[in-house]
Image: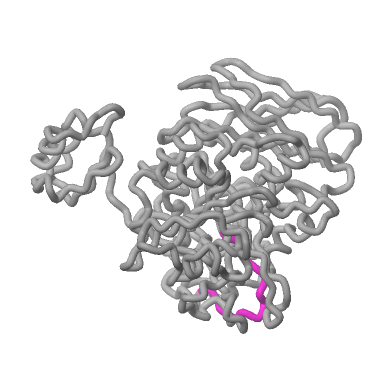
Amino acid sequence: MHRGVVLDDSVKSAIAAAAGVDPAEMKVEDGKVHLTVSPRRLTALAAIDEVRHIEEHASKRLFNNVAGGILRADLVHSTPVSLQGQGQVVAVADTGFDKGSRTDVHPAFAKRVKKLYALGRIKASDPHGHGTHVAGSVLGDGSSMTMGGPIRGMAPKARLVLQSTLDSNGGLSGLPSDLRNLFDPPYTSDGARVHTNSWGYSNRPDGSYVQNCFELDDFVWNHRDCVILFAAGNDGTDHNADGVIDSGSVSPPGTAKNCITIGASESLRPDFALTYGTGWPGDFPANPIAGDRVATNAGGMVAFSSRGPTRDGRIKPDVTAPGTSILSTRSRIAQVSNDWGVSHDPLYFFDGGTSMATPLVAGCAAVVREFFIKKKGHQPSAALVKAMLINGARDLSGQYIPSESGATPNNAEGFGRVDLAATVGPLGPNEAVDFKDEATALDTGESELTTVAIAAPNRTLKVTLVWTDPPGEALQNDLDLIIRASDGQERHGNVFADATTFDRVNNVEQVVFANIPVGNVDVTVRAHRIALRPQSYALVIRTA
């Protein structure tokens, strides 16, 4: 329905008549009407003045000790000023949590479960196992003698809020129709500033922007410090058997603009023998993918990780993290499989997918927030957290010839695999990171200049621009990132080094300028087109 429209009896009757259904059969919720209708009646429905938007209903589905090392979170945890998510609250929307109790909890979460929401059933327990595994990858802090010692999430000192969305039939009907009603309670009541989601649309792996994407973008637009993460999905396939993963399979709501969308790279479990062709013969019939084992190359992309771009051409996913054979916490009431490896400890099990990659990045996001609050005295925006993770990410080398990823940014890995140490330190020699965070709002034609001094040759400048765009399909406010070196060379965000064009579709732009000449560099953010109110932004500048 259009904004301000009241779904009174007359509107309901008009919709029912156009759809040819009994008004009592319609489900009305949050300004939406859910009904089953013949395609021939869509024209009559669209002709009703009060109807703003019609889209196909899609059911939702789930899309998790080695990953921490791959993401270099272990270095961050072990520094003298250890960053482990202390003071951060992370919300997880998933199947449930362990036994559904805040006191009788899995030992990896002792004294750190802040709240449980039972949205799909009377209790927030986890008979499925997915939610407890995901939560462990975010902030679990356990140990297993039989599985090699510590098994920790990326933010092992953070606190957990879990929204159990599993219903009694094994579906996810606990998810509200309007996603703003999912994000708001943990944000408003519990202080959660990171919200992670390892689920997506089951019948829309097509890069489309749907109403739930609008709601997500709208929530972040109005709650500027809420970092929302979504799994890209597990719909990567090689349908034409050419040995290359097909494009355009990211699932909503991960196609939204203002979230961080996560793809999966491989973990390192060389003893795990499963190949893509054995596990999914119909999806990966040809080499080099078919015969490749799923967890042997940390520089490689997972074949089934959904690829971008979105339908409107945006780069997705944003970043990647390990997503194969991930060891994490097991719900004590769940029956789980050994499909991703055998655990000899009943409190832990292996799982795989972008579902497992996403909570790893959510834990990293909590650590980034802790970094800004503790070390910078600054409450970061969601745009700044996203910009920091992207700026610190490392380009995957790939594992095939030609590479399945390529130079960043690309629609397999996005801007690269998260590197937490590169994001918040310890930094390398002669490496420095600076930032700006939504201090300036630009209108059409306005710009802001930042000057960076390059004191020595053979240095690399990496600049990342992120802005929280107003809700709506496609870019609403368009900013440009322009880098001008001391010798006059100019680079623009996301385009080739010698290009004079600009990116007109993404609200993330990045320039990596290797061997930049010595002298002062002009970093300009310019407002090309502002459709709504003036646009603020986050900027991260790295010299190395």
Give the image location of residue 456, x and y in percent: 91, 35
What colouring style does the render use?
A: one colour
Give the image location of residue 71, x and y in percent: 70, 58
Q: Would residue 55 be visible to someone looking at this image?
A: yes
**Which quarter of the rendering shows the C terminus?**
top right
> How many numbered marks have been drawn onto this rendered protein structure?
0
User: Which residue is pictured at 61% across the width and 59% down the height?
Assistant: 112
Vertical relation: 318 (above or below) 218: below
Left or right of residue 411, residue 33 in this image: left
User: Which residue is pictured at 64% across the width and 41% down the height?
Assistant: 385
Q: Tell me where the magenta segment starts and ends, as one range.
A: 264-276
Q: Residue furthest top?
A: 445
Give the image location of residue 27, x and y in percent: 21, 48
Q: Would residue 244 be visible to someone looking at this image?
A: no
Left or right of residue 494, residue 58 in this image: left
User: Which residue is pictured at 73% across the width and 47% down the height?
Assistant: 423
Residue 83 is a magenta residue: no
Viewer-side residue, 423 vs 38: 423
Give the image location of residue 291, x and y in percent: 56, 76
**Which quarter of the rendering shows the N terminus?**
top left
Viewer-side residue, 219 vs 242: 219
Viewer-side residue, 423 vs 130: 130
